Image (tube, rainbow, N blue to C red):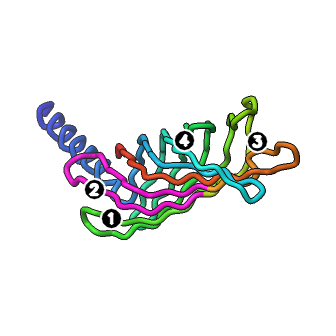
Amino acid sequence: MKLKSLGILTAASIMTIGANANANLLFDIYAGGTFGIGGNTIFYDGDHTAKSAMTYGAVLGVDLPLFRIEGEYNYLDGDKITTNLAMANVYFKIPIPVVKPYIGAGIGTTFDGKYEPKNIAEFDLDDTLAYQGMLGITLDLPVLPIKIDIEGRVLYANDIYELADEKADLLQYDGRVKLRYVF
């Protein structure tokens, strides 16, 4: 009798574990890291300066069948400018089996930024609203719980600083690779 009860308990446990593994068919939770190379342009009074820049970041999100929603942190490291970005992104993806194209948009804020223009001492940037657009593809490896995103991205932040009644805007553009681990 004890052996029969143990067998039933074992079978019930295996079925429960299998059911939990299939419960995430509707959505996946993921975390990951990003790296991008590109440039940024600072616009002020009709003039502009363009410099190269790199971005590093982390993401946490939910992957649904047609959409992806994520929170993102980025650190922008340019020649004369450094800043942190916190963004909320939404992606629309085309469901093709292995390579999935997507388009996305995000809104967030810049914070703790520094700017060091030529012949002027370093000063802090204003915390301001930022917008971004993304276009890319996801490589979905069927066997591994890792997804690779390759994307182009453009970010715009308005009035990042004011110096001598001169306001400046930031335009950041880069190519980016994102590795996501699906839980």
**Where 26 falls versus 164 (above or below)?**
below
Label 3, label 2: how far apart the Cα atoms are = 39 Å
Label 1 neighbourhood size at 10 Å, few (<14), some (14-19), many (20+)? some
Label 3, label 4: how far apart the Cα atoms are = 17 Å
- Cβ–Cβ under 8 Å for marks 2 and 4: no
Q: Position of residue 94 (x, y in %)?
A: 37, 70
Quadrant containing the N terminus in the rendered view: top left
Disc 3 target residue: 126
Q: Is residue 153 left or right of residue 159?
A: left
**Where 44 falls versus 54 (above or below)?**
below
Q: Earlier along the polypeptide chain: callout 2 or callout 4?
A: 4
Q: Name the amino acid, label 2.
A: Asp
Label 3, label 1: how far apart the Cα atoms are = 37 Å
Is most of the magenta stretch helix, strand or loop? strand
| Residue 3 occupies quadrant | top left
Disc 4 target residue: 74
